[in-house]
Amino acid sequence: MLGPVILAASRSDRMRRLISAAPVTKQVVDRFIPGETVTDIVPIVEDLTAKGLELTMDVVGEDITTPEQAAAARDAYLELIGRLKELELGERVEMSVKLSMFGQALEGGHELALANVRPVVEAAAAIGTTVTLDAEDHTTLDSMFAIHEELRKDFPQTGCVIQAYLFRTEADARRLADAGSRVRLVKGAYKEPAEVAYQQKHEIDKAYVRILRTLMEGEGYPMIGSHDPRLISIAQELAHQAGRKLDEYEFQMLYGIRGDEHLRLAAEGHRMRVYTAYGTDWYGYFMRRLAEKPANLRFFLRSMVSK
Ligand code: FDA
């Protein structure tokens, strides 16, 4: 029951102010968001890639309210890509972006988000890597998929995320499982109503397997975004059944969650990409991590009390 309450709080400005200002929060936040600036994050990129892991980078932020903030988000990614160029890591480090951070919810937001994300995709391509469009709440997805399709005309390797909890996703997966596509499948992290999404964990897990089968049997490149041990072994089995080689799909997990598993899968020869978030506007991202595992909330609250 706690998850939906935390997800509701993740959209509350009052809670945002309270939690962001709490004296001990930063220390707890660091587990999931290990830096605020490009300078903080570069050593982490170097460390993880030296261990055989790949990365997808998220400059945290969402739900911005002005076009200037959207432009600043674009520039933050361009700054990051500028530093990545010096590291010469190519596709081992890609970008993940949330279109709401690029202005999608503002007036004329669809065009604005496309105009802001395009230079990021161009800059990524120029250093030999790519961008994946994260999936946010269901009201944003038609716009996200349209932007994805538009970007793929010039940059076919641009990826997108689909969420197993949404009823629409099985059809989206069939549409997206074409040659050259890159699709990350996740369970879904937002509070969605029963009209559009499964609410029970077992229903979501079953949908995840059905959708993953579609992706594995299709012609694209599936990216399995999950920490769930059961789904990870099912994914390996489905990949095997579909005759996929180890470099024809990849696992993805979030920084700070099941780190040993990242290394275990990489050591087995799998491509393992760590979603690594950094930046100052961490509130929404952090709250979704709390909602996924209520034990995180207990840890967080204990750290505040023991201070
Ligand atoms: P599940 O929640 O069942 O967790 C399985 C196990 O993993 C747990 O038992 C626990 O051990 C561990 N675990 C999971 N979450 C944890 C946490 N927060 N803290 C500690 N342990 C945890 N969602 C979305 O809506 N849009 C998106 O674009 C993305 N992008 C994305 C990228 C990547 C690479 C990943 C891995 C996930 C996302 N997500 C996402 C989030 C996703 O929708 C989902 O909320 C989380 O991955 C948790 O679901 P699992 O599949 O891990 O299973």
Image (tube, rainbow, N blue to C red):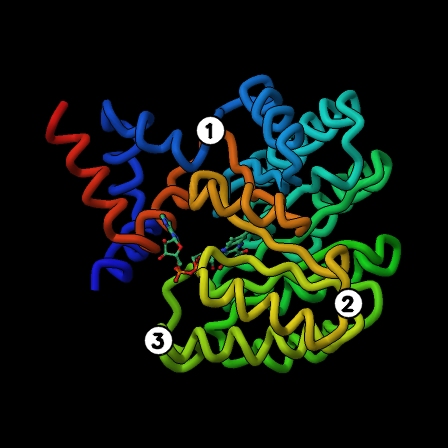
Q: On the image, numbered disc 2 is attached to which residue?
A: 220
- Which of the numbered marks, if any, corresponds to residue 88? none
Sequence order check, earlier mark of 1 and 2: 1
Which residue type carries mark 2? Gly
Q: On the image, numbered disc 3 is attached to which residue?
A: 199
Q: Position of residue 267 (x, y in %)?
A: 62, 44
| Residues at discs 1 and 3 in contact (Cβ within 8 Å) | no
Frontmost residue, 255 versus 20: 255
Between the C-alphas of marks 2 and 3, the distance is: 28 Å
Which residue type carries mark 3? Gln
| Direction from residue 250 to residue 101 in the image, left or right | left
Q: Is residue 289 above or below residue 302?
A: below
**Which residue is pictured at 45% across the width and 33% down the height?**
33
| Direction from residue 274 to residue 297 in the image, left or right | left
The verdict on label 2 being within 8 Å of ligand 1 is no
- Which of the numbered marks, if any, corresponds to residue 34? 1
The image quadrant in which ligand 1 is located? bottom left
The verdict on label 3 being within 8 Å of ligand 1 is no
